Amino acid sequence: MKDTIDSGHMPVPAHRLDQRVTQLWMVQGLIGTVIAVVIVLAIVGGVVASADGIWRLLFLIPGGLLVAGVLGSILLPPILYRLYRWEVTDLGLFVREGWLFRTWTIVPHSRIQTVDTSSGPLQRSFGLATVEVRTAAGEGVAIPGLSEELVAQLTKELAARSGTGDGA
């Protein structure tokens, strides 16, 4: 028997993302934190050069940003991983995502216009990719952090069920 969500009694999709996605999200978060801290340090450095007295306090800003960024990069990915679920059902592709704002999306097979895959250099270094499903209205859903083998199977299944490809 499937778990249900308290509000609306919708079934929880069966599949999780590949667990390596948590490491990917941590690395992405840390890279973003370093970039943000460097930018803030450059700004603070410019202000300090033109002001006297409060310069020591100004350096608390990048320090706080660094601490918050590192904590967020470490703590959030496992939470997001636990909450992101997906499943291909007879009705369509069902995706649940979100932490503060949860979203349940069902893209019916008959509405699927394209099934795309993408993976940047960082994703490829973890052996992961993203499947993006779009409708004719331009709406859709993305499933990040899937193994390359699963991406091939999923795109083939979605293409076959939606009629956008021969499934081969």
Image (spheres, rainbow, N blue to C red):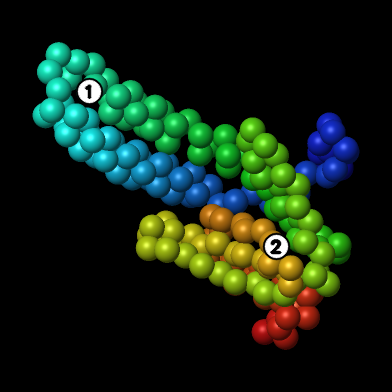
> Identity of the amino acid at label 1?
Phe
92 over 156 or under it: above or below: above
* Residue drawn at (83%, 72%) of the image: 110
Q: Answer with mark 1 or mark 2, whichever residue precedes in sequence.
A: 1
Q: Position of residue 156 (x, y in %)?
A: 67, 75
Nearest to the observer: residue 36 or residue 133: 36
Nearest to the observer: residue 3 or residue 36: 36
Q: Position of residue 100 (x, y in %)?
A: 64, 33
35 over 59 or under it: above or below: below
- For label 2, the SS is loop
* Residue drawn at (30%, 43%) of the image: 35
Residue at the top extreme, as displayed: 53
Residue 59 is labelled as: 1
Quadrant of residue 70 in the image?
top left
Q: Position of residue 105 (x, y in %)?
A: 75, 52
Quadrant of residue 3 in the image?
top right
- For label 1, the SS is loop
* Residue drawn at (60%, 51%) of the image: 17
Q: Which residue is mark 2?
A: 139
> Identity of the amino acid at label 2?
Glu
